[in-house]
Amino acid sequence: MGSSARSDLKTVLRIDFPNKARIGRGKMQLLEHIRATGSISAAGRAMDMSYRRAWLLVSAMNSMFSHAVVDSQRGGKLGGGAVVTEFGEELLNRFRSMENKLNEAVADDIEWLHANRNKPAAGDQ
């Protein structure tokens, strides 16, 4: 999500809601993993987090909006599963669009910062 192909500096979008809830790239990555795997636990594992942590993040997202972001089913004969809802897909698409707009808007400034920062000495990285 770098702001420029030449710069290693990054912008990070996070939306803070008045009730201290927030969405950012971590929750969006979780949604992408849920979409890819059909599973909250597999999505959590892909991000090196526990099922409980992933489930809490999904629960937080579902409670933030008037529509569910993820629908899940408990395990059983057919096993459990999770799906990103139509609203969740729209949320993900809009968030990625906001990231792109942010990166485009600040690209020149990021390049300026990159050009004027102190470079780490060899071995300091």
Image (tube, rainbow, N blue to C red):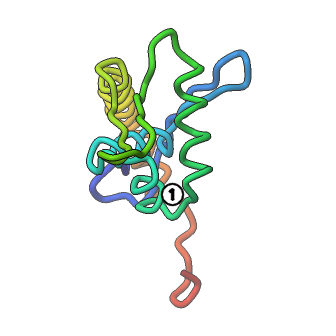
- Residue 12 horizontal/vertical position (percent): 50, 42
Residue at the far front: name it. 77
Relative to residue 104, is residue 20 depicted above or below? above
Which residue does the numbered mark 1 point to in the structure image?
116
Name the residue located 50 percent from the left edge and 50 percent from the top edge.
113
Q: Is residue 39 above or below residue 49?
A: above
Residue 3 appears left or right of 119? left
Q: In the depicted view, which residue is nearer to us: 65 or 107?
A: 65
Q: Is residue 123 left or right of residue 86?
A: right
Q: Picture quarter containing residue 87? A: top left
* Rendering coords of residue 5 (x, y %): 27, 55
- Residue under the point 33% across and 24% down: 85
**Which residue is painted at 57% across and 32% down in the image?**
59
Q: Nearer the viewer, residue 95 or 106?
A: 95
Q: Is residue 28 above or below residue 124?
A: above
**For the view shown, which residue lies furthest in the top direction?**
66
Helix, strand or loop under label 1: helix
Res. 63 image quadrant: top right
Q: Position of residue 102 (x, y in %)?
A: 40, 30
Q: Give me the residue at 54% from left, 31% from top.
A: 23
Quadrant, the C terminus:
bottom right
Residue 121: horizontal and vertical position, in percent? Answer: 55, 83
Amino acid at pointer 1: Asn
Picture quarter containing residue 110?
A: top left
Number of marks drawn: 1
Compared to residue 67, the image places residue 91 above or below, namely: below
- Dot 1 crowding, Cα within 10 Å, few <14, some 14–19, many 20+: few
